[in-house]
Image (tube, grey):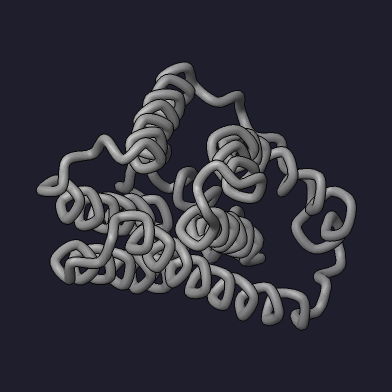
Amino acid sequence: MVNSSLVPHAADPNAIAQRLIQSAHTRDGLPEMAVGLTFLLISGLLYLQVALPRKSVGFIAAVLACALFVPLLIFGLPWILRWVRRRYLVERVGYVQFKPVSRKLIGLSILIAAVAALAVLGIVTGRLPEPSDRWLLAGTGLFGGALGALCGRLPRFVIAGVIMAATGVLLGFSGVPLQTGFAILYGLQGVVSTVSGSIVFLRFIRQPIESGE
């Protein structure tokens, strides 16, 4: 139960509600773990594309998985999280029915997915010009770090965002190949998010279940 004395009476009710929903959404650490494991999967698929010979079965499978399976997984993560919470954590988190996703957010997600698909296509075909490699890595780190910090709005998300931004800039100007740089960027961020989410989840599970009033 949130202490009403800690909430300014002059604050925007919508902003207060948004903060409470965000806090409820991230208190069990599952979203961080899901994002971290997804990043690790992407990192592994990119590494396979670097390590395996082109036109080999493994290389083609990694490309198809990165282009087709990963977007489906990303769009399915909210449903997976809801299922896990209702199936295993309903006594701790309760039942929450969120309002439908707005059309603007859906359009933005589709736009980001399209840009990501074009970037993957450019990486696989080698058509991205050499001067843009460093800026693509640095830009991905900065944008991803800023987005994570802005969406999370908690110290641990800010720290993770700073790590991602710094890693992207360092990789961008270190001269590493583009695919290798993305594999390192997503791999490191996947480890950070997975570890952070796991720590929060363990602390959440150890808390006593509150009895209903």
99 versus 77 height, above or below: above
Which residue lies at the image location 20% right of the left edge and 71% below the top edge? Answer: 170
Is residue 49 shown left or right of residue 88? left
Q: Measuring 67% from the left and 81% from the top, which residue is drawn there?
A: 203
Q: Is residue 128 above or below residue 166?
A: above
Q: Is residue 136 visible?
A: yes
Residue lying at 20% horizontally and 57% vertically, measured from the top left: 138
Position of 131 compared to 167: left or right? left
182 or 141: which is nearer to us? 182
Q: Position of residue 78 (x, y in %)?
A: 65, 41
Question: Can residue 23 be seen in the rendering of this structure?
Answer: no
Residue 196: percent from left, percent from top? 54, 75
The quadrant in which the N terminus is found is bottom right
| Identity of the residue drawn at 45% across and 24% down | 110
Q: Nearer the viewer, residue 3 or 106?
A: 106
Q: Quadrant of residue 108?
A: top left
**Nearer to me, 89 or 209:** 89
